[in-house]
Amino acid sequence: MLLKTEEDVIAFARHLTGDNEIEYLGNKMRTWVYKEHEIRRQGRETPSCLVVSTNGEYLLFDTPDDKLSGRSLKSGHLEDTPFGSGRSKALAEFCSKVTGHELIHFGYVDFSGFMRGSFLVPKDRTEDHSFFVIEGPDGLSVFRGENPVQFVAEDTPLEEIEAPHFTEKAFWIGEEKRLDDPAISIRCQLNIVDEGEFLSLLEAKSIDEIDATHLAGLAALHDLPTRLGLNGIGFGGIDVNGPEFSFEITVNVADWKLFVTETRGQYEGCWGDQDWYPESPEEALFELALASNANDSPDMHGFEIIDWSPRTLSATEGTPEP
């Protein structure tokens, strides 16, 4: 939501009306696709209504009767005002980080008949996928496009190209600030089925002596971390309970786009799936470190991957050293 606070709405209403005195009366959320803000303009008793959709389109109705009849006093998109300047570029930069593609903002489109959002396409047009982003109360929802866009000229108006088709389920839902913190941590749970093979992989003599040095080989993150978009890698939290073996991996991401690009490349190399995108930074780390890395299948090394879960780092834990 581009207008996040009451103060934002008042400032925007002042910009649209030229009135210095704006009284904020309240708001109503409609389905989550748009919000109606009721305001009282300077020197008036009848309230006005400012409707703002989650993708930034707005309508200003002078009176309640005007709203009922659909006669807007002003309309447009926040991107074309001082309050939304640069938003399309920010969305493209964020989605480049979570998809691994260099993206450009192509325009605003309908989705499923009742939602509107941003249409993003790969800058170099070498990929079949386009992307669609909706801004909602829980953050951004990013959907993968189904139709090719690489043959569409960059100066082609959106209304002149084939209507984009998108998956019904978003592969990413979250707030942009999630990527402000470069640290990611997960806990992995394994089941040791052949202790000898497992120790051979880790180059350890016994389970008790396994430490972070040995786990680096298991996670296959020790080879050129900078190539993976990482600054630092750490291992710890080892716990052994019979055949159950668990440990933690923490990384410091230096380049989100490169990190996701490398993860997708390894996933495709393992499973032949070009359409997969990680739902979270933690899922990307799990795939890159354990599930889709360059090592042989776990059963060839005496263990099974049982489960994994994200960890929330405390302020005192910090991030791994490069």
Image (cartoon, rainbow, N blue to C red):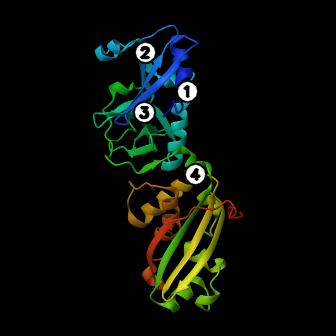
Q: CA distance from mark 4 to mark 2?
A: 46 Å
Residue 103: percent from left, percent from top: 49, 40
Residue at the (48%, 87%) spot, across then down:
243
Instruction: Judge by depth and name the residue closer to the eye, 162 or 240.
Output: 240
- Residue 50, labelled with which disc? none
Q: Amino acid at mark 1?
A: Asp
The mark that comes first in sequence, 2 or 1, is: 1
| Above or below, comparing residue 27 to residue 238 in the picture | above
Residue 211: percent from left, percent from top: 65, 81
| Above or below, comparing residue 128 to residue 289 in the picture | above
| Above or below, comparing residue 151 to residue 271 in the picture | above
Q: Amino acid at mark 4?
A: Trp
Dot 3: element = loop
Q: Nearer the viewer, mark 2 or mark 1?
A: 2
Left/right placement of residue 147 relative to residue 263 reads: left
The mark that comes first in sequence, 4 or 3, is: 3
Residue under circle 1? 8
- Quadrant where the C terminus sits is bottom right
- Residue 159, by quadrant, is top left
Q: Amino acid at mark 3?
A: Thr
Dot 4: element = helix
The mark that comes first in sequence, 4 or 1, is: 1
Q: Amino acid at mark 2?
A: Pro
Residue under circle 4? 256
